Amino acid sequence: ATDDVGLSSSLSATITLDTLVPVVTITEPPEDGLVVPTPLLPLRATVTDATATRVTSSPEGIDALLEFGSGEVFGDVALVEGENVLSISAEDRAGHVGGDSVTVVLDTVAPELTGIEPADGAVVGLPSVSLRVHVYDESATEVTFGAHAFTWGVGGAHTAEADVDLLPTWDELTGDAFIDVVLTDAAGHVTTV
């Protein structure tokens, strides 16, 4: 602009055009479906964007402002028993929102033996028995008894059945035979019966 005496001034403004959504990549935990035994879990992510970015997590644990748009964020999040979806979202100055999420399972409880057939104390007339074991757990579980092992990749109620030779554990004096049943879940909890 120029005034009546010929003096001029100018004003300029820098405007940033941001058409891209922030890119969020969760780096910890490293994979979907992780099973953990403790209720506090580290959550970490990288964020890439051209402008300042507000980053938050659900559940709460991360709330950060990345002044230059890109960087790493981290915090601890509280989990509840069972499946948890962990999300991180980033909103840039232009209002674009990007995010990432992973699912983890909190399993603080050992696998439960919900039934066994034949029942403890049963009398059988043969040196082998068809053993049926009923199990419940929130995560993947392995059941072993005799020379048999069964694995289920997901939590829930499951049944394992196999013929078991009683002679290796048979006590001639008492007539008793013992079968160890071991339940191990993905969080490392063990139940032995």
Image: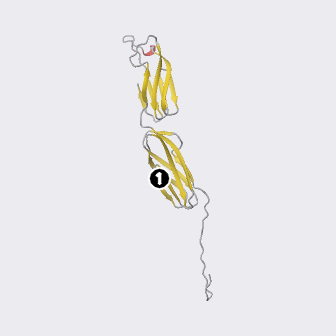
Towards the viewer: 83 or 163: 83
Instruction: Classify 22 as above or below 109.
Output: below
Label 1: which residue?
Answer: 62
Residue 180 appears anywhere in the view? no
Asked where in the image residue 16 lies, by quadrant, the reply is bottom right
Label tally: 1
Give the farthest residue toward the left.
Answer: 174
Q: Quadrant of the C terminus?
A: top left
Most foreground residue, 5 or 43: 5
- Residue 166 drawn at (x, y percent): 45, 15
x then y, percent, for residue 85: 50, 44
| Residue 19, x across and y down, in percent | 62, 59
Dot 1 alpha-carbon crowd within 10 angstroms: few under 14, some 14 to 19, many 20 or more: many
Please tell me whether residue 180 is drawn above or below residue 105 in the rendered image. above
Residue 145 lies, with reference to residue 186, above or below; the image says above
> Between residues 85 and 41, which one lies in front from this camera angle?
85
Q: Secondary structure at mark 1?
A: loop
Q: Residue furthest bottom?
A: 5
Give the residue type that dot 1 points to: Ile
Q: Is residue 124 visible to us here? A: yes
If the image is split into quadrants, where does the N terminus sit? bottom right
